[in-house]
Image: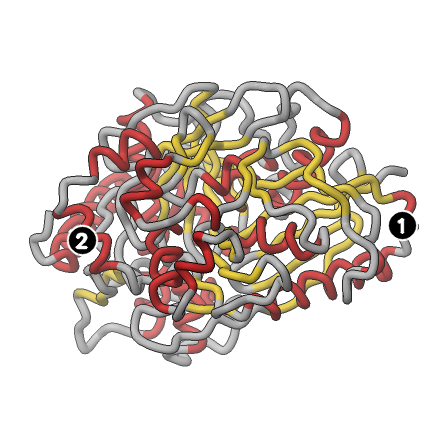
Amino acid sequence: MRAILALDQGTTSSRSLLFAEDGTLLGLEREAVEPVFPEPGFVEQDPEAIVAGQFRSATRVLQATGIDRKDVAAVGITNQRETVVLFERATGRPLAPAIVWQDRRTADRCAELRAGGLEALVRERTGLVIDPYFSATKIAWLLDAIPGARARAERGELGCGTIDAWLLFRLTGGAVFATDVSNASRTMLMDLRAGAWDDELCAILGVPRTVLPEIRPSAGHFGEVASGIAGAEALAGLPVTGIAGDQQAALAGQGCVRAGLAKCTYGTGCFLLEHVGDAPRASGHRLLSTSAWQVAGGPAQYALEGSVFVGGAVVQWLRDGLGVIDSAREVEALAASVPDAGGTYLVPAFAGLGAPHWDAEARGAWLGLTRGTTAGHLARAALEGIALSVADLADAMGEDAGHRVDELRVDGGATANDLLMGIQADVLGVPVVRPGMLESTALGAARLAAAGLDHAAALPELGPGGGEARFEPRDDPATRAAVRRLREGWRDAIDRVRGGRD
């Protein structure tokens, strides 16, 4: 049996999964990742803890499954995107905490760039908008905040990359500092069509090329796990043959490998991607044009993407911040205890609003509260806020693509909530399809690794396997009228949160 080891380094956990060649999940181990919030708008993580946790989970999954090391053919990496680590190349020592994708500390710098008329240039070259979400201004902030860092970076002494590049550097004992096109496309520094760092943008944004990793295709030979890596001894000699950012990996794992197929991942945030083929497509609704992946020797593949910064994290907040529920599983029953949200709306703009609004100044709000509002109404408004945010993305994407998708494939932890999936189907008016095996992100990394190992020309059009659940939209007049009212109220809530900002 040939197995593929997928390292799935996410915002809240570092997970390692073993897959058989047919996509069967053989084992999964995880380690929690704790974010730190040192100041309002700041979100950080410990880079060494990320590495150590990822290595521990990988070692444990091999032990737990009893898979012989010689039966593991390759390693695939998928990761939280936009998060960056600055480190010394000679020692691999991080110089600062990782700045997480949710971090908003560079909002003022992004506002300056927009005021300077650079939005059009960034949009045309990278497919992105200017926003602190992306990596470039994070990297520049680190180089300016740490004494001597910029001069050292220009001398080639430092490296700064997304989490995939950081893990690869550590796995290979510093032999390889590289990223793939999907992660590089999220930095605001890569020319989307050329698949290469853009010198003009690097200069404008204050990021020296010398600090950046090499850009490679997503499926191909990246290097081998070095011997003697503390905590990763069990992986020594394994080739790393696939890398992709988590959302692009989920697109591959859901089998969305041709134009017109779309998926949405419901994790900490929500990320809707539609495959658009082998040429990037510009958005008229402030969605992102992004790299999907590239198999070595084949053409680059592209996607349209919309991001909701806070999705499943709303449920965590209900649990940890407000104490409304004791566990995430309880939110479904609590929300189902009422027929609707009683006119309340939760706009989960805790870290600003992503697509299609891109409003870094927006903050979350609960609107429509009365003395009759109960915990059930609050729970239901939280689920509806997630579904309505995704619906906004789907509307914008349908207009950009010239068609609405026939169905939405979904994955991620929050999709286990049947009520949320039913609300989503009603609001979208199309079926929502949840696979039996929800580990689409890791499966996509494994498929890319298999393609890189086998020198495949393209990825197969395979979904995540059987056992799927299908949520059909209700099409009765009462439901359609309720959805209309819900969406009208949501648009008003968004306007209030944005305070008239365009």
Q: Quadrant of residue 21?
A: top right
Q: Quadrant of residue 255?
A: top right
- State which quarter of the image contains the N terminus: top right
State how many labels appear: 2
Q: Is residue 121 visible?
A: yes
Query: On screen, 60 above or below 320?
Result: above
The x and y percentages for residue 179 are 56, 42
Q: Earlier in the sequence, mark 2 or mark 1?
A: 1
Point 81% across, 45% down: residue: 238
Q: Which mark is residue 69?
A: 1
Amino acid identity at mark 1: Arg
Alpha carbon separation for disc pair 2 and 1: 51 Å
Dot 1 crowding, Cα within 10 Å, few <14, some 14–19, many 20+: some
Tell me the element at label 1.
Answer: helix
SS of the residue under disc 2: helix
Residue at 49% in and 60% down: 86
Residue 131, image x and y in percent?
28, 50
Report x, y in % for residue 295.
61, 26
452 left or right of 188 in image: right
Question: What residue did someone put label 2 on?
Answer: 111
Choose between 231 and 157: the one closer to the eye: 157
Mark in front: 2 vs 1: 2
Q: Residue at x 78, y 54 (%)?
A: 27
